[in-house]
Image: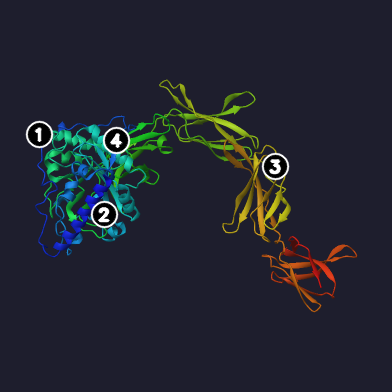
Amino acid sequence: MKKQFRTGILSFLVCTVLVQSAVIGYSTETKENSITPDDSITLHNSGNENAAENEIAEDDIKNDDNKDYTDGLKILQSSEVSNEFAKNNDPLYKKYMSVSPIANSRANKFGVTQPTTPPALVGVNSVDGIDVSMYQAYSTPIDWNKVKAAGISYAIIRCGYRGWGTGEIVADSYFKQNIEGALAAGLQVGVYFYTQAITEAEAKQEADFCKNAVKGYDITLPIYIDIESADPKGRLDSSGLTKAEKTNICKAFANRVQSANYTGGVYANKTWLENYIDGTALAKKFAIWLAHYNTSTDYAGEFSMWQYSSRATINGIRGSVDVNKNYLTKPHQVTNLTAAPSTTNPSEFILSWTRAAGAYKYQVKTYDEATSTWVSLGTTKSNKFTVVEPYSTAERQYKVRAFKLIGTEKIYGAYSSVVTFGVNLKKVTGLIQTSAAKKSVSLKWNKLLAASGYYVKIYNDNKKEWSQIKVISGNNNVTAKITGLDYSTVYKFKVQGYTTDENGAIVPLTNSDTLKTATLPKKSGGLKYTKTAPKSVTLKWKVLDRVSGYEILRYNENTQKYVVCKTVSGKKHNSTTVNQLKQGTKYKFKVQAYKLAGEIKWAGERSKAYSITTVPAKVTSLKYSFSGNKCTLKWKACNGAGGYEVQRYNNAAKIWSTVKKKKGQNSIKYKFTLAKNNSVKLKVRAYKYIKDKKYYGFYSTKKTVKH
């Protein structure tokens, strides 16, 4: 069956190209003014043609977001069905298999006459795009780079259809190839599904099929339900559904798509939008894609994209292709902005609003009284936004606007009405330690709108009880400095607000969560080195009591700051080796003790700086050569060396003694005389002076020179 369908498609597409080639230049007068996408179809509607908008059901917002309507549904692949099946089920089959191609003038952009801008959209810019299915990619894969170079900015790609004969959902087998090719070429992408749904549940099946198909892809344009006539005997055309019922099918699909945070859209031709679905009502909630094959349109309803021809020729695509204008219209204004406390976190609240037609994302802003400006809190694809501290603990103003993305341009809609909200908490939140000293800590917390003042409490480990340590009157000050503490000690604090009743009696509010704090350790000292190597130094310092550990800091010459390079846990572990250093290089270090309060480190005063130089590298590659009795010993230069010291072994005294000192990194030769039949043992090491102190590297391997 697969082979049979592929053969039929290939034959048709070859025929299409041949016919187009034969007529190019013959009929440049051919126009599409009188053609509509459904001219060959007899429309059928037994319902009320003038169904009032108030008869259309409200949005079906149910708690079924976690339900997959495609679960257990048999989904066919278009590559697996026969030519006969496609003929009796695929709504696009007639469009591409039964209609002769129309001759195009290459003098026109995309081979078709460009449409005039609709009166309502005069002054609004537009970008060119196409919509494709398997029929554009079956015989020859689309060259998406050529498509983009031809001036196409976006592609709306069919991911599947429901058979107008059997009602089965069929996946477009070229969807993955098309969407990945378009995205790789840098085109924006949207998706459409050709519906034959006759119930809202079936529309949700189709929406969930689309949601599953686009997972992992960057979908920045809408996911459209394509609703139009397929065949007079087809399940949708012969269903007898009313205008309201067909409209609700569109709404069920688009709402379902938007519940997954995609932009919902409806594709339909002019006749359907005016007579068979309520285009006006749908445009209030979703993006409308108008199909009207003409150089002008008198459709009076709202739309943002116009499919004006199905006979375009685009470089990179074999055969005819639909071409569209996407107008850079603004998404609708956000409405019904509300705020409500979070049910899970008392220091948060939730902003929510009604989704705006055409919205890709939403921007949330709050008014900052300190700067008298509106500040963005972020963006979201959802119609909900969680406001967290510090914004949730005082009354603030909030507003939201929608935007859509055309290329890299964000097109914003109007702001919502402003909502004012603040969580009227009874429990203090946000208690933190802002600073510490050896005998004090400083605390800060979020203001309680209801509080008249605050109690600061400390935990007594000996008595195992909380006691009040400080009282703060009024609600302006939300900080406290607690003094008289001991060094390098962990403490626990709580803060409790209070208010007064109508009789002036104190009414305690709810305690904050417990905060662990810590005072600082004593100043570190006694830093020195115990060992130095070409690429490391080993350091040691004085042990301090009550500490959680130590941090070694190394001076960064570029930033001129000390940066932690090593952490040593445990108060008795007072030595460490710092690795990954450069040979023969001077470094400066400091050490500081720290005390842990929970997961936060509170570091004490740093030690004095201590300088140490890594030694030069070990001398390697000793070689010698003779010229008569004159011997030359050579070795490999050591980076950073200030010179070299050559030592010779005295066999009689059985000691090594220095016989030559050579200055300079590249002074790598030592010449001496050695009589015939004699031998001598030599070794070499590099050295470097730092502030008149000589630092030696490791000796080379001993070398026996024989003559």
Picture coordinates of residue 378, whole percent (x, y) = 37, 44
Residue at point 38% right, 37% down?
A: 386
Give the total number of marks visible in the rendering: 4
Q: Is residue 93 left or right of residue 554?
A: left
Does residue 110 sit above or below 461 in this rendering? below
Task: Residue under label 1, please give it.
Answer: 46
Amino acid type for the residue under numbered disc 1 = Ser
Structural distance between the alpha carbons of marks 2 and 4: 27 Å
Does residue 206 sit above or below 308 in this rendering? above
**Closer to viewer: mark 4 or mark 1:** 4
Residue in the foreground of this view, choosing between 460 and 286? 286
Task: Residue under label 3, please give it.
Answer: 573
Residue in the foreground of this view, choosing between 630 and 327? 630
Callouts 4 and 3 close, C-beta under 8 Å: no
Q: Earlier in the sequence, mark 2 or mark 4?
A: 4
**Closer to viewer: mark 4 or mark 3:** 4
